[in-house]
Image (cartoon, rainbow, N blue to C red):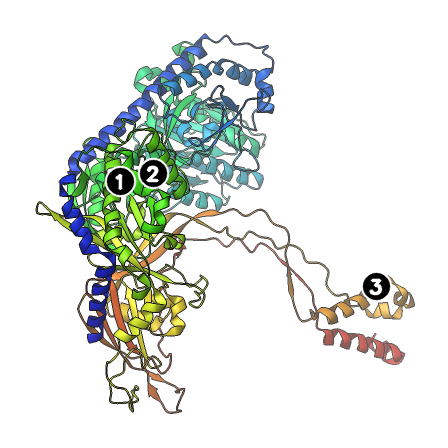
Amino acid sequence: MHWAGRIEKELEKVLQHVTGIQQMRSIYNEKKSQFEIKRNNPKDLVERVARDISKLLNSKRKALEKLAREAELLQKEHEWQDGVKDGEEENLLENPFSLELEFVDDPNFKNKVNYSSSAVQIPTDIYKGSPTILNELNWTQSLERLFIDNRREDSSLRWQVFGSATGVTRYYPATPWKAPNKIDLYDVRRRPWYIQGASSPKDMVIIVDVSGSVSGLTLKLMKASVMEMLETLTDDDYVNVASFSEKAEALVPCFKNLVQANIRNKKIFKEAVFHMQAKGTTDYKSGFTFAFEQLLNETTAPRAFCNKMIMMFTDGGEDRAQDIFEKYNWPNKTVRVFTFSVGQHNYDVTPLQWIACANKGYYFEIPSIGAIRINTQEYLDVLGRPMVLAGTRAKQVQWTNVYQDALGLGLVITGTMPVFNLTADVSTQLCIICALPISRVIFFTSCLPLLCAAVQLGANGYTYAIDPNGYVLLHPNLQKPVTLDFLDAELEDSNKEEIRRQMIDGKPGQRKIKTLIKSVDEASHQYGKNSCCYPDNAPLPSPPLPDRPQLLPANLPLSVADFESLLPNSFESEGHVFIAPREYCNELELASNNTEFLFNFIALMEKVTPDSKQCDNLLLHNLILDTGIIGQLVDKVWKNKDLNTYGFLAVFAATDGGITRVFPNKAAESWEEDPEPFNASYYRRSLDNKGYIFRAPYRTGADDLLNPENDTIGVLVSTAVEISVGGKTIKPAVVGVKLDLEAWTDKFKILASNHTDRQGSNCGPHSACEMDCEANSEDLLCYLLDDGGFLIMSNQKEDWNKVGMFFSEVEPYLMYALYNSSFYNRKQSYDYQSVCEPIPTSSHGAAPRGAFVPTIADFLNMAWWTSAATWSLFQQVIAGMAYQSWFITDEVLAEGMDSRERGCVMIQTQYYFTNLNSTFNMLQDCGNCSRSIHTHRMLSSCRLIHAKKINNTNLLFVVAEKMPCNGCEIDKLSQEEEECILWLENTSDCGRGHSFGPSLVTLLAIQLLLLSQLACPSALLALL
């Protein structure tokens, strides 16, 4: 495999010569006095980040406590008015523009807002003109002053919201309310932040009466009620669901104990509830016995160990099950019992009321579907009673998990705090449903990463935070509002399981781990070494840090002249400049377009001095230092090279300081990489790997094929610049080129050929001479693959338009042989945040009437021949002949409901190198072929395969003979993301109709038979 060595030497020589990597090292060495080396200390860094986050949360906490305290005073001082009229408040609700508020676009809220006023939202199922609602609107109007004061003290605050137990939501700043769906079903009392703040963690057992009397509409109401009850639970709660008639049993057999009320478990419960069936007779004692044993048994399984409660759904009964309560719950009454009478019936409800009142619970009625939402959430008011009695001990700020903001901010976490109704004495509060309005202050989860500067974490370092349940609050892989466990956000291994456990337990620690890391473009895996550190006392941030020192600029004075090389008038001669969209200064306006951002940056530098206090001097020093270094590289190397001579489309350099320069300027038109180097796949992969990293444009089999004749296909090649300072090796920059695929494919075939005189010789698969990749492309397959199994180059012209595809899409048998020989290994990862196409809903309906076949009686009736039926039959015959539809059975579709996207789990497989031997040979044998293309004799489908890794690159050189036939039976390897089907109910088939399209021959035969019988009456009488 001397060809591989030849390719390796040519790549090394040309890439070093054109990129100027050696000259760039020299430039860095010349400027040693302008920077210093500092190694990351993970422990100090994570503790500082934890302190910063704690400081941030404390500032929000103060605003929240102030709002809750003042809200209690305002509510206490308010005088109830029975005769209040629906005046301005009602008018404002009917028309959000009735006060003629002026709304202005605010990028912080991603919405139009008005800072001088608040707005109100009330659920659609609540009467807006009731005295309770109007009094609530009256006194909460005074909260506007507090909202405005809070924002004046802390401009980083986002929405400030007051949610009431009556359903009223007052939020600031005002913005027109936009329902997420066609029907506005928003109810503040159903929001996760309200539920979490209104009650303590709960251990709940739901028991459902499925006796024979529960059928029809009552059973449907019961199922819907239980599903709504599950939605009132959060990740801090634990739950189990059981059905009972003569005996009780868990609805989900594998849930032997209470389980955490997370999204996954609730989904399983709902599926089981949906399939409940009614049968047997009612026995309350069996249901309550099951529930009490679940709640009171001593187990090592995790529990909330706070509020314990039983929720019973039934259609009614006479039994009070008093002996069960005496055995398990009296006299301490540690378990609350809530009873729900479901459906419309004439049973005596006194026993159900007694059960609830005798066990510190509450009785609710659900006569129709409209009562489900309200009555399944009012139990939270009862659970608030102990919080009122606890006073200040219960007034603690709680932080929710990540969820989607209803007003359009995106992913947020929320601080929530209870507000108590202090208008009645304590003894009275124990008997009434106490109002528990919740105040909240929202801030972006995206604010948190800014607390830890990227220049300190490095390109492959990041900060994450989890809550006490192990769910991610902050993580670069968190994209959608789901309950995402830390182990699901990462590629799981035993080290990360231990890190998660210690963070939840509040134990500090630090460890180095070697783990697989998925690339930014999700095309490959690589091994990375990171240091992971976590602070004391809380599952707070833990930044995995790249185990390498950082290059930081010395504190040198800056001037506006240092930024001149960034001006667009220098692009034509020195190449196009992209700068990372970082927060260099407080007043710098971000922009979606990098050119616009560059103009904003230069304009700001003309107004303020670079050493201004409003600017981050560290970021600016890094930017200027790297700008000068790349500028010298352009003058010394790039300007003196004719890139076309070497088969290059562009040469580029990117640095930790945030500068990316692409030369020549016209190459920037097709530059699609992220302007933030730390987010660019080529940059991060180059830092974590040695040598040159090749990356073709990633494409799948579903993408359109490239056209090499019309499209210029470029392959990106990059490598890190290593310098040594003070005995430490650092990588402050990455340089690279973009190869012209067509030019380098020709060079690739020449390098993989035999430099001998071929005159008079004809090498082939059965000749004695050695074939090569250029002269014998019809018989010999030659490929360059990257470490993820993607095609980079091929000597087969028909494969040029497949560059960037997973190799199994190009040559499945050869890729299978490489994988089966352990040259590649694979790692499967799951994405729990995916959104899939909707499952087709039933849209089949009744079919239109098909072809009409007249009866014998019709033929005997002369009036029929002059009727519309005859004309209709004639039309059917003509239409059938015209459209040739007589042999087709048409499925008729009816208009269905709107389909929506659904959450799903996606699985993706990435491949990576495992066998790094210098040379690898194998014999692929697929048995015998039944025939050959050239001969009719039996041929063996064996072929010899050579594979060799090209040193100092991520390339694999593969040479194989073409197979005489495709006789292998293999499982085709795939890299594309696909849905992981855990379980799926087929709901598409719920009745369908077909239009009858009989055969034309059959129809004509029937007609001729009838006509012939009509011509012979005797035969017709015989038939009759």
- Viewer-side residue, 849 vs 300: 849
Q: Amino acid at mark 1?
A: Leu
Position of residue 656 measured from the top left corner of the image (x, y, whole percent): 24, 44
Query: Dot 1 lies on which element?
Result: helix
Q: Classify mark 2: residues with Cα within 10 Å, few (<14), some (14-19) or many (20+).
A: many
Left or right of 248, for residue 216: right
Q: Is residue 563 above or below residue 936?
A: above
Residue at image position (33%, 64%) is 644
Residue carrying label 1: 623
Is residue 336 shown to the viewer in this render? yes
Position of residue 435 measured from the top left corner of the image (x, y, whole percent): 45, 19
Position of residue 321 measured from the top left corner of the image (x, y, whole percent): 42, 29
Q: Is residue 546 above or below residue 651?
A: above
Left or right of 620, for residue 163: right
Q: What is the total number of numbered labels drawn onto the structure image?
A: 3
Q: Earlier in the sequence, mark 1 or mark 3?
A: 1
